Amino acid sequence: MEIAILGATGGCARFATIGAIQAGHQVTVLLRDPKKFDLGDEQIQRQLTVIQGDALNVEDIKKAIDGQDVLVSSIGGTGTFGLAGFKLDSPTICGDAMKTIQQAVQQVASPRKRIIVVSTTGIAEKTRCTLPSPSSLQVAPSLTP
């Protein structure tokens, strides 16, 4: 299966990327900054295509999703806690990205079989957590062939 993942530098999509690759799938990720996404494992890198772009740009999304069987979107903002409380750097990012995704999906030649959307924007005090090594992760049954 070929899977496109948006928002892969975040926790949920990062785990999904690793799990999908471990299950034998080819994965394409759309990243604003590919330097932030190094899984370090040579086997994983062989099954991974990285496209530099922005999830708010229709053309960039089209490059990432065309020909894919599944689209996983885990677009989200970064939150910070301060004296004034919780503040999200881009409070409308999830909705804005979905509008752009809808436009891109309608324009690509290959129809989407599945679109999966997950976001934890705003629920954690930390914006980044330490992830376990890829070899210690288990594959979700829904991602197996």
Image (cartoon, grey):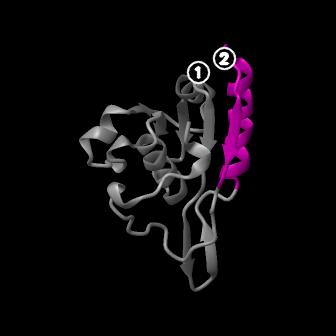
- Contact? badges 2 and 1 (CB < 8 Å): yes
Residue found at x 54% / y 73%: 80
Reading the image, the residue beneath label 2 is 110
- Whether residue 142 is situated above or below residue 3 in the rendered picture: below
> Residue 106: x percent and y percent?
75, 22
Local packing at callout 2 (Cα closer than 10 Å; few below 14, some 14-19, many 20+) is few
Name the amino acid, label 2: Ser
Residue name at image x 67 percent, y 42 percent: 97
Task: Name the residue nearer the viewer: 18 or 13.
Answer: 18
Residue 53 image point, x, y percent: 48, 34
The residue tagged with tag 2: helix, strand or loop?
Answer: loop
The residue shown at (58%, 20%) is: 67
Q: Which mark is residue 66?
A: 1
First to last magenta residue range:
92-118
* SS label for mark 1: loop
**80 and 143: which is toward the camera:** 143
Would you identify the image quadrant in which residue 51 lies? top left
Q: Is residue 63 left or right of residue 85?
A: left
Picture coordinates of residue 26, whole percent (x, y): 45, 31
Specify few, some or many for label 1: CA neighbours under 10 Å numbering under 14, 14-19, or 20 or more: some
| C-alpha distance separating marks 2 and 1 | 6 Å
Q: Amino acid at mark 1?
A: Asp
Q: Which mark is residue 17?
A: none
Q: Quadrant of residue 65?
A: top right
Depth order, front residue of 96/69? 69
Q: Is residue 132 left or right of residue 73?
A: left
Relative to residue 61, is residue 27 drawn left or right?
left
- Relative vertical location of residue 33 with respect to residue 49 in this rendering, above or below: below
Q: What residue is shown at x 63% (from left), y 68% (from top)? A: 122
Q: Residue furthest bottom?
A: 83
